[in-house]
Image (tube, rainbow, N blue to C red):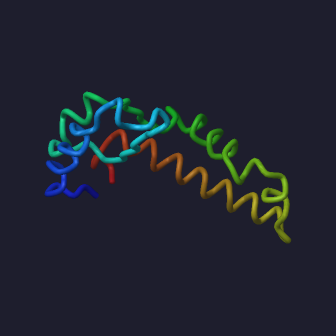
Amino acid sequence: HLAVSWMPTLERICEAMAAEAVAPSFRLWLTSYPSPHFPVSVLQNGVKMTNDPPKGLRANLLGSYLADPVTDPDYFDGCARPAEFHKLLFGLCFFHAFVQERLKFGPLGW
């Protein structure tokens, strides 16, 4: 979500910040989807980061299994019915990987 009406105010605030008046440890984190309403000056003066999903089903599945909390043995094996839990977890991870792959194709095939 992006408050389009607040973008000019954000731009004025960011332009008014002087490097000598701001603490050296100050960081301003902004998250947003791509939008034509986001102030260009804020984008040009900042560091941009993206978080892209892994390419391919296998890489996406590995990413899911190597992320917290799945990597924690207490979480992975702590269920009273581990066989059913492992199958359910695989199904959920596979579905997530499949949907991430389909996002590349947009509305085709849905």
The x and y percentages for residue 17 are: 28, 38
Q: Quadrant of residue 81?
A: bottom right
**Residue at 25% across, 28% down:** 44
**Residue at 35% across, 36% down:** 21
In this orientation, which residue lies closer to the viewer: 85 or 2?
A: 2
Hey, which residue is sitting farthest front in the picture?
21
Q: Quadrant of residue 90?
A: bottom right
Above-or-below relation of 39 to 77? above
Answer left or right for 68 relative to 57: right
Above-or-below relation of 85 to 31? below
Number of numbered callouts drawn: 0
The x and y percentages for residue 47 are: 37, 30
Q: Quadrant of residue 95?
A: bottom right
The x and y percentages for residue 56 are: 52, 34
The x and y percentages for residue 62 are: 65, 39
Hey, which residue is sitting farthest bottom in the picture?
80
Looking at the rendering, in which quadrant would you find the N terminus? bottom left
**Residue at 35% across, 30% down:** 20
Looking at the rendering, in which quadrant would you find the C terminus? bottom left
In this orientation, which residue lies closer to the viewer: 41 or 70?
A: 41
Answer left or right for 105 relative to 26: left
**Residue at 22% across, 39% down:** 16
